[in-house]
Amino acid sequence: MMSSLKLALVMVTVVSLDMGLSTITKAAMSRGMNQFVFVVYSNLFALPCLVLFCFLFHRRKPPPPLTPSILCRIFVLGIISCSIQMFMYVGIRYSSPTLASAMSDLVPAFTFVLAIITRMENLDLGASSSRAKSVGTIVSITGALTMTLYEGPSIVFTSSTSTNLNGNGLSPQVSWDVGGILSAIAAFLLAILYVFQTSIITAYPAEPTVTLICCSFVVVQSSIVSLISERNPSAWRLRPDLELIAIVYAAVFVVSLRNVTSIWVIRRKGPFFVSMFEPVGIVIAVVMGVTFLGDTLYLGSVVGAVIIAVGFYTVMWGKAKEEKILQDIQPHGMESSSHNAPLLQNITP
C-alpha cells in the first residue's frame, strides 16, 4: 500500500493543479476569454477522458442499471455543478484566485450548517465535537468576511495591473467584494452538491458513470446559459493562445484527472485526509497570483486567509473526533447520519 507521504505528495499535486487552473483562467479572462464559454468547452473536452476512464473502470464489472429516477437526480446534480462553475469563474474574474481559494475552505462549514438544517446531523453543544464544528463554522465565516471587506496595507506590491483588467466597469474594491460574494455562493452550492451527490452515489454506486453523465448534462446546460449571455460569435472561436491552453488544462488535469485522483485517494485514506490539504491551496494561489498575475497582496487577505484556515481545521478536528467516537462505539455498525453529508469529498463539480 502506498505510504501516507506519497499520498500527501499526490494531494499537493492535485491542489497545485487546481490553483494552476485558477491562475491560467484568470489570465485568459483578462485577455478577453468569456467565462461561460470556458465552462462549456472545458466540460466538453473532458468527455473523452471520462469515457476512457469509465471504460477502464467498468471493463470487468459493468455499472448497475440506470433508472429514470437516478437519471433525473443526476440532471439536477448537473444544474448544481454548472452553477458552481459559473459562479466560481465569474468570481475569479471579479477578484482573484487567492480569494476564490480561500472561499472554498468555507465548504465544510456550509455543509455542517446544511446537515443540521436537513437534520442529517444533530447539534449537541454538550459534545466537544459539535462545539468544535460550531465554533469553526463561525470562525470560517468571520475569516471570509474579513478577507472580503477588509483590505489593509499592501504587503507585496507589484507594478503589474493585470488583475485589474476585469472589464466590468467597477472600482477595484467593489469588484473584489462582488468576487468574494460570488465565490462564497459557489462554496455554498458546492456544499449542497456534496449532500445531494452522496444520496445519488448511495443509490447508484458507480462514481465514474455518474461523473460522466453529470459532465454531459453540464455541457448542455452551460451551452444554453452561454448562448443566452454571450451573443457574440467570436467569443466561441477557439484561438491557439492562452485561452485554448486554459480549456485543455481544465479538461484534462482538473475535470478529469483531479476527479479520478481524488476518488482514488479518498478510497485509501478517507475524505478527512483529502480535506487536510485544502488550505494549502491558499498559499499556492498567493504565490502564483503574485508571480504570474502581478497581484498585490494585502494584509486583509493574509489575516482573513489565516482565520479561515483556523476555522477550517477546527471544523475538521471536530469531524475527526466525532468519527473516532463512532468507530469506537460501532466498529462494525452502519455509518452515522453525519456521513450522509460528507464535508470534504473533493469530487469535481
Image (spheres, rainbow, N blue to C red):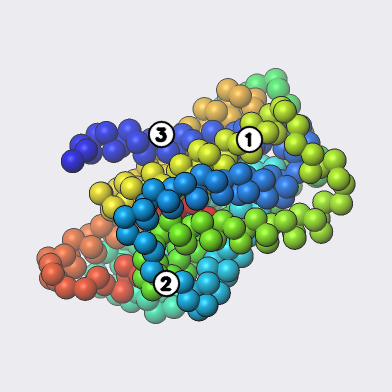
For the residues labelled 1 and 3, the Cα–Cα distance comes to 18 Å
User: For the residues carrying marks 1 and 2, which lies nearer the camera in this image?
Assistant: 2
Mark number, residue 13: 3
For the residues labelled 2 and 3, the Cα–Cα distance comes to 35 Å
* Quarter of the image where one finds residue 332: bottom left
> Which residue matches tag 1?
246
In the rendered structure, which amino acid carries the disc numbered 2? Pro
In the rendered structure, which amino acid carries the disc numbered 1? Ala
At 24% from the left and 70% from the top, the residue drawn is 335
In the image, farthest residue toward the top: 159
Q: Earlier in the sequence, mark 1 or mark 3?
A: 3
17 above or below 199? Answer: above
For the residues labelled 1 and 2, the Cα–Cα distance comes to 36 Å
Q: Earlier in the sequence, mark 2 or mark 3?
A: 3
Asked if the residues shown at circle 2 and circle 3 are in contact, with their CB atoms under 8 angstroms apart, the answer is no
Circle 1 Cα neighbour tier, 10 Å, few/some/many (<14 / 14–19 / ≥20): many
Mark number, residue 65: 2
SS for tag 1? helix
User: For the residues carrying marks 2 and 3, which lies nearer the camera in this image?
Assistant: 2
In the image, farthest residue toward the right: 232
- Across the whole image, how many numbered discs are drawn on residues? 3
